[in-house]
Image (cartoon, grey):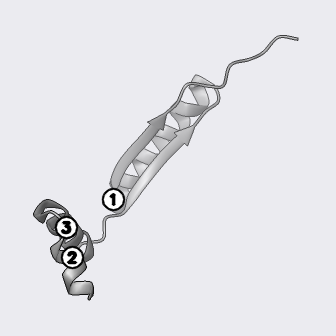
Amino acid sequence: MKKMESSLKPQSFQKLESNAKEQEIKYIIANRTDGFGERMSALLNAMYIAKNSSLIFKFIWQNPPPISII
């Protein structure tokens, strides 16, 4: 029954799933939501760790939450 379910998926999805199973990809991710300086510090640290460990570097840059004035 499982074989029948996989045959219903488009070929492109089947190829992506088989590639993901064959190769495990690891990342170093930097993510901070506070001030610019702390974001830059996290970014540089993650870049250094990724370079020295031969992993892929990624970062997330979200806008900080709005400050409400009461």
Horizontal placement of 55 versus 13: left or right?
right
Q: Give the residue type that dot 1 points to.
A: Leu
Image: 62 above or below 52: above
Q: Secondary structure at mark 3?
A: loop
For the residues marked 3 and 2, what is the alpha-carbon distance in whole angstroms?
5 Å
Q: Earlier in the sequence, mark 1 or mark 2?
A: 2
Residue at the (38%, 45%) spot, across then down: 58
The residue indicated by pointer 3 is: 9
Q: Is residue 35 left or right of residue 41?
A: right
Quarter of the figure with residue 28? bottom left
- Where 59 sits versus 67, above or below? below
Q: Position of residue 47 (x, y in %)?
A: 40, 45
Which residue is tagged 2? 6
**Which amino acid lies under the numbered mark 3 shown in the image of this protein?**
Lys
Sequence order check, earlier mark of 1 and 3: 3
**What is the quadrant of residue 9 in the picture?**
bottom left
> In terms of depth relative to the viewer, which is nearer, 51 or 24?
24
Could you say where residue 56 lies in the image, as x and y percent from the top left? 32, 54
Report the residue that reaches farthest toward the bottom: 1
Give the secondary structure at mark 2: helix
Q: Nearer the viewer, mark 1 or mark 2?
A: 2
- Under mark 2, the amino acid is Ser
Examine the rendered structure and indicate whether residue 19 appears above or below residue 49.
Answer: below
Of residues 59 and 48, the one nearer the viewer is 59
Q: Please give the residue where the numbered disc 1 appears in the rendered image.
A: 55
Do the residues bearing badges 3 and 2 touch, measured as CB atoms within 8 Å? yes
Quadrant of the drawing holding the N terminus? bottom left
**SS of the residue at dot 1?**
loop
